[in-house]
Image (cartoon, helix red, strand yellow):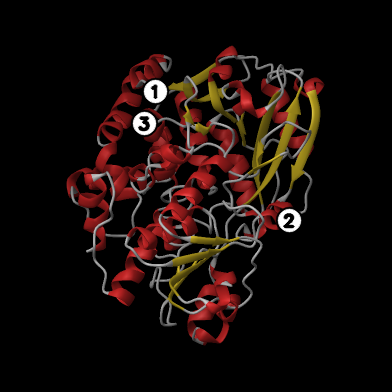
Amino acid sequence: MAESKKYDAVVVGGGPNGLAAAITIAQSGHSVALFEANETIGGCVRSAALTLPHFAHDICSSVYPLAIGSPFFRALPLENFGLQWIQSPASLAHPFDDGSAVVVERSIEATSAALADDAAAYRRLFEPLTRQWNGLDVELLAPLHWPRHPLNFMRFGLKALQPARRLAESCFRGSRARALFAGLAAHAMLPLDFLASAGFGLVLGASAHAVGWPIVRGGAQNLADALCRYLQSLGGEIFLNRTVRTLDDLPAALIVLCDLTPQQLSSVAGTRLSGKFRRRLNQFRYGMGAFKIDWALSKPVPWKAAACARAATVHLGGTLEQICASERATWRGFQTSAPFVLAVQPSLFDRTRAPAGNHTLWAYCHVPNGSELNMTDAIESQVERFAPGFRKIIMARNVAPPRELTRRNANLIGGDINGGAPILKQLFLRPTASLYKTPAKGVYICSSSTPPGGGVHGMCGYFAARQAMRECFNDNTLLDSRSSRLEAGVEHHDS
């Protein structure tokens, strides 16, 4: 029984950060056990038959530029444990009402060629970031630190700290390039006139060229399963269907790493934390929620812009002004009838996702945190806007408002898929100025509510585990990895 066994470390929560933390511990030769409340591992990286038999849907995340670009994940031999990436021919598409679309190709030259007068501006914005990606990724996916290449990082930071709308309007003259950048920046789940919202557009745009926006063959679950199998190969133990209500539910261990959001940590740790620290945790601001729909389709989505069929990800929101209005209204607690919609069509590129001739699609829009509004018609209207006849090919749908997303994964408080609002005060010092550490001896937080924040990259878990091992084991050993860049880069920030 796990309760009667003592471990060097235990991890609460089996999302990508919990798995990354457990792997980091196990790689250093320490015993570790991971406890997951659900019957399957993965947190937001899971798949299920949500609509009809033989249709595989990703229950939350599905496209992984930050996973394939993660310095930590890239250092793991996950392909030996069943992971296969699939890259669509183009990273993403952004259609317009006139039946055209801007497509982000892996090639910056090919992408910029479709932007007419903004071609040179697009190259000036993204060429340096793409060229510097191997190095910039380590700097960005890390807690606040002094960068190894300060000049390059300063150039990025001066742009990234701007509001996305201001950067788009100052860099580009045409509506198509501005809209494209707005769609990239809207992944932040912030109003695009907020400081630092531009950073999200820059990182996602550069990653589209540097590493692509891949999906996982067979579904997101296969990424989680590969991490799980690798952890077990290192001797790590995993216990499913094990809800941890208090830290007293866990076996004895020197380190406890919690892949939980601040409010959950406050509840689970209870009086082990000081009252002052618990108040800080409970003051943490969660972000906008998501309203997600999965569809089983009788045929591919009938896009007006045929180029949309070349990309797994499609941004549906129209112009910069329309996307800005949608995100601003949602942040203020209102809901627009024409929301920015992020859609993913994995079955076009992975035939394991649906029976022959059929297809899958999922999409979500942003909603006020915890919203009870039904956005089904609004989302489907946005798809229909750019793909007339879409509703006629729907065979079945599965609707997941914020409440359902929270039921699937308790970390998605109010439907917040980013682990907290990335407002400026929470962008670097999250959830508190202590980052991963808590006042309780040996207790750490390692979820996406810690730096570097949301996204499937595992870096929150990695850095939390490294700090815990330094402080509890006096362990400063380097990872046994195949990536000298990770050792020279990420480990540089640990020291």
> Which secondary structure lies at badge 2?
helix
Which of the marked residues, 2 or 3, is nearer the chain's N terminus? 3
Q: Residue 92: x, y in percent?
A: 50, 26
Dot 3 alpha-carbon crowd within 10 angstroms: few under 14, some 14 to 19, many 20 or more: some
C-alpha distance separating marks 1 and 2: 37 Å
C-alpha distance separating marks 1 and 3: 21 Å
Report which residue position mark 2 lands on: 403
C-alpha distance separating marks 2 and 3: 39 Å
Q: What's the residue at 47%, 55% (across, down)? A: 232
354 displayed left or right of 486:
right
Dot 1 alpha-carbon crowd within 10 angstroms: few under 14, some 14 to 19, many 20 or more: many
121 displayed left or right of 354:
left
Q: Which mark is residue 475?
A: none
Which of the marked residues, 1 or 2, is nearer the chain's N terminus? 1
Q: Is residue 183 above or below residue 11?
A: above
Q: Is residue 91 above or below residue 473?
A: above
Q: What's the residue at 45%, 25% (across, down)? A: 177
Q: Residue 268: x, y in percent?
A: 59, 76
Q: Residue 241: x, y in percent?
A: 66, 62
Q: What's the residue at 49%, 37% (across, down)? A: 82
Which of the marked residues, 1 or 3, is nearer the chain's N terminus? 1
Report which residue position mark 1 lands on: 106
Q: Which residue is nearer to you in this view: 146 or 354?
A: 354
Report which residue position mark 3 lands on: 171
Determine if residue 469 is in view.
yes
Amino acid found under the numbered disc labelled 2:
Arg
> Which secondary structure lies at badge 1?
loop
Q: Residue 394: x, y in percent?
A: 79, 26
Q: Which residue is nearer to you in this view: 17 or 10?
A: 10
